[in-house]
Amino acid sequence: MPAKTDPERQRLDEANARQQPWRKWGPYVSERQWGTVREDYSADGDAWNYLPHDHARSRAYRWGEDGIGGFCDAKQTLCVAVALWNGKDPILKERMFGLSNREGNHGEDVEELYYYLDALPTYSYARMLYKYPQAEFPYNLLVQENGRRDRRQPEFEIIDTGIFDADRYFDVDIEYAKADAEDVLLRLTIHNRGPDEAAIHVLPQAWFRNTWSWGTDKPKPSLERAGDDVVVKHETLGAYAIHFDGPDEIKFCENETNVARLYGSEETGHLYKDGFHDYLVGGRKHAVASHKGTKAAGIYRRTVAAGASTIIRVRLSPGPTKPAPFADFEQIFDRRKSEADAFYAELQGKVLDEDLRRIQRQAFAGVLWSKQYFYYDVTEWLDGDPAEPKPPKSRLTGRNHEWVHATMEDVVSMPDKWEFPWFAGWDWAFHLTTLAYLDLEDAKYQLILLGQSWYMHPNGQLPAYEWNFSDVNPPVQAWAALRLYDAERQRNGKGDRKFLERVFTKLLLNFTWWVNRKDPRGLNVFEGGFLGMDNIGVFDRSAPLPVDGMQVQSDGTSWMAIFSLNMLRIAIELAQEDDAYQDIATKFFEHFLMIGGAMTNLGGKGLSLWDDTDNFFYDWLVMSDGEATPLRVRSLVGLIPMFAVEVADMASLNNLPSFARQRDWYLRYRPKLAALVSRWNTPGAEDRRLIAIMRAFRATKLLERLLDKNEFLSDYGIRALSRYHLEHPYVFEAGDFRSEVKYVPAESDSDLFGGNSNWRGPIWMPLNYLIIESLNKFHKFYGDDFRVECPIGSAQMLSLKEIADVLRSRLINIFRRDEKGRRPVFGGYEKMQTDPHFRDHILFHEYFDGDDGRGLGASHQTGWSALVANMIAELHE
């Protein structure tokens, strides 16, 4: 972490001590509220069609707000964002456009170009870039062309339309700085990158989230003009003033639904949410007011010469209007930008390569920009609001109806604020390990939050994600807790025991839920829905099996072994100061042994998830008549058992005599079980002890496939499915059911599980990260003398630590310029590869082509693809 004398570190200390609310204001506004579950009150649960993009500009949202480069307070009472109009678009550009799940030929897809470039954890400085075409925005072309294409063709992106080819676009540089905790400055720099002068309307906007239209008796706030300023009047937010620097106009409307446009109601003379659109694009002068409303905008009409730029300035300050709000404006920006450079110079002190520093800093920026205000009261959502029509009865037995306890209103890390603008339980864990480099206290707070009673179900289940809280994701929260604890111990010399204990207590409940709900036969063999890896297997694992039987999951069972080991390690750590945890440590040691034994002897019938012929872990299909068949798909499912590994120092174990006695009892009276999974009594490097599903033989055999370029090893990391299946698809047939699993390195070619992501060949950052961590753990036990050929066929023998570094480098190379100056993430887009206004702006995609590293899926999934920032740090520590 940066030094304590660093101004940003001091601000974080003040925020943590609750001396100053430095985290109160931030970029917590979603980029897509339309098409979300929270806003869906349909009978069939079709969120995309219930509130589509065409309605978004005219319908007041119930649960949150969206915008371009938005900033708001932590309760999203007041929002600030940017609107644009080039004089040609049919719609005022107030929000990001994209395709719904059914419109995109590979699922939902944002069709804009924007980049998160910089941010400090307190948002005392933050910067993003939006690229706005000067020609009419190609809404219809994007919808029609993607609708025409099938799954054998790639997505049709906005850059494919040619609209940026002649550089006829504006770079809209959106910067925020804070003069103090609640004094927020916005600077918009509009660059004309084209060959001719071009006109643009720029509307910095401020508006209240609508809290008054739902029958809750909340008073309606107001924004009121006072000369060239706007005064904020709100019951709980307090007094603020909005200062616009030299606008051509200041106009107002209401953040309320345009019932005339959407529902054909008679015009009532009211002002509506789309008032600025109607005023500028539609030419309706009466659509706006001049003095008061719940939504305000400074309107700037600018003509920008070719290659030139113009600056627009806004200030949101607490208290009454300032007499000279822009006198110190540029000095504040200069100071905050300098402080951001100093913060990252310290954080990246060991990273000397300029390109790596750029990649890492933008990854960190994406994590910070992807935090969002998330509000969802499931009971209110199910019952409906007093002033609105009652929701259909079907929703009372539909999505999330079993989560009536859930009342979530927090600023939390999101996978992506357009394509995934809601928290996702297992994504969240990975986000926080990256956030910990920047703001460890907030990372700890968010992990604790997930286990609170308004998130966690009373039965102990953790919510998966908004579309279905009851779905099942890998239980990686204990792993994340250890990462945060170890990070703090490494930086400060001591971990936060209270934090670890709080998380552990909640995860005990979650572990019990897994044992009671996901091991239906009590055989220590676990099932877990699709476990995050959508279409990786033969069956859609979130749906009932299409055959009369059950699937025994290698990954579901392995995730529970991993969960057991993480809980064991936490218990051992807590037992260093509290003997009561020794008994709990024994419990998880026993669980791990039983799960490991079950993986090698399913149901006591001699069946093993490990296949001695192929030397790989497979799922099994067990039919109702008892017939069992291994599903010989070489995928990440078979690699996940390697994550079940922990290494302990004897020094910490020697402090736990009670645990040692109980552990030795198992090793003495259950020797066959212990021998299957553990090297607990065998000293390794530096007298360490190993407990793992795999011992040396199986680990070596698995690595032979992992490090084979014809199987899992790509130039850019580990593929989700072996390339072997390109020429040898796995085919399963039973009765009328037929399924084929084939290596597909890029977008999905099937509709299985919606088809909007693909685990049948591409590279996924989070599981690559766990592979690297596991290799390092095995190295801690086996040491440098244990060497493996890498890549297979190269005759190059490397230690496991060296292999981990090789994988880190390959993953980093997705984003890094190669010897030709090209970034694999950009694929064949020449403009992105060579144009000076594109080539250094990085996109962190959801996943990456298994052959060439091209970015795929959600283009701003900085949530977990930001793990590349961790890898850069780890390579240089």
Image: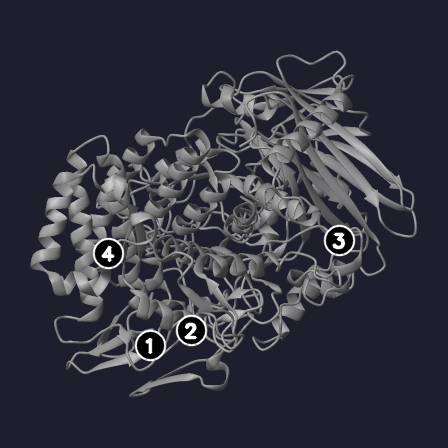
Q: Counting residues from the N terminus, which is met first, the one under dot 2 or under dot 4?
A: 4
Q: Nearer the viewer, mark 1 or mark 4?
A: 4
Q: Residue at x 47, y 59 (%)?
A: 768
Residue with the mark numbered 1: 615
Residue with the mark numbered 4: 682
Q: Where residue 355 sits in the image (x, y, percent)? A: 69, 49
Would you say residue 409 is visible in this rendering?
Answer: no
Q: Counting residues from the N terminus, which is met first, the one under dot 1 or under dot 4?
A: 1
Number of numbered tags placed on the structure image: 4
C-alpha span from label 2 to label 1: 9 Å
- Decide: few, some or many residues near mark 4? Use Cα within 10 Å; few <14, some 14-19, many ≥20: few
Kind of residue at disc 3: Phe
Q: Where residue 249 sits in the image (x, y, percent)? A: 79, 29
Q: Counting residues from the N terminus, which is met first, the one under dot 4 or under dot 3?
A: 4
Q: Counting residues from the N terminus, which is met first, the one under dot 2 or under dot 3?
A: 2
Kind of residue at disc 2: Glu
Residue with the mark numbered 3: 838
C-alpha span from label 3 to label 1: 46 Å
C-alpha span from label 1 to label 4: 24 Å
- Decide: few, some or many residues near mark 2? Use Cα within 10 Å; few <14, some 14-19, many ≥20: some
C-alpha span from label 2 to label 3: 39 Å
Kind of residue at disc 1: Asn
* Outermost residue, left side: 669
- Tell me which corner region of the image, top left, top right, bottom left or bottom right, holds residue 277: top right
- Decide: few, some or many residues near mark 3? Use Cα within 10 Å; few <14, some 14-19, many ≥20: some
Residue with the mark numbered 2: 704
Q: Secondary structure at mark 3?
A: loop
Is residue 96 or residue 771 the one in the foreground? 771
Query: Is 188 situated above or below 422?
Result: above
For the residues labelled 2 and 1, say whether their Cβ atoms are less than 8 Å apart. Answer: yes
Q: Counting residues from the N terminus, which is met first, the one under dot 2 or under dot 1?
A: 1
